[in-house]
Image (tube, helix red, strand yellow):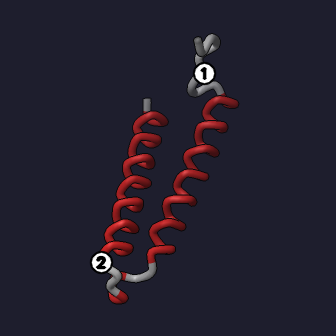
Amino acid sequence: MIIKILLVALVIYMLVNLFLAMRVMIRNNPEDGPMSKYIGRRVLTSAVIVVIILLAISTGLITPNPRPY
């Protein structure tokens, strides 16, 4: 259960960074920092999510659906 809560929190964090990058892109304000900072956080977060899912599956904390259809 903790793994699923952590994954949902990371997905929300990834979406927040996506919208922060969009705000920087629309405003084009140099004081907000570069847009690549937020995009980099988003990419790093998605890589962490994939690693956590793979580790949770390999240790048996979560089980994938045996029949996806």
Q: Position of residue 28 (x, y in %)?
A: 35, 81
Q: Count the marks.
A: 2
Q: Residues within 10 Å of mark 1 (few under 14, many from 20)?
A: few
What amino acid does circle 2 point to? Arg
Q: Which residue is mark 2?
A: 27
Q: Is residue 21 left or right of residue 64?
A: left
Label of residue 14 in the image: none
Q: Residue at x 50, y 64 (%)?
A: 41
Location of residue 15 with respect to 20 vertically, above or below = above
Q: Are marks 1 and 2 in contact (CB under 8 Å)?
A: no
Query: Which part of the image, by quadrant, shows the N terminus?
Result: top left
Q: Which residue is mark 1?
A: 64
Q: Residues within 10 Å of mark 2 (few under 14, many from 20)?
A: few
Q: Residue at x 32, y 85 (%)?
A: 29
Looking at marks 1 and 2 on the same chain, the residue that comes earlier in the sequence is marked by 2
Q: Is residue 28 left or right of residue 69?
A: left
What amino acid does circle 1 point to? Pro
Mark 1 vs mark 2: in front: 2
Q: Quadrant of residue 8?
A: top left
Q: Residue furthest right?
A: 58
In terms of secondary structure, where does tag 2 sit? Answer: helix
Q: Position of residue 51 (x, y in %)?
A: 64, 45
Which of 15 and 6 lies nearest the eye of the viewer? Answer: 15
Q: Position of residue 27 (x, y in %)?
A: 30, 78
In terms of secondary structure, where does tag 1 sit? Answer: loop
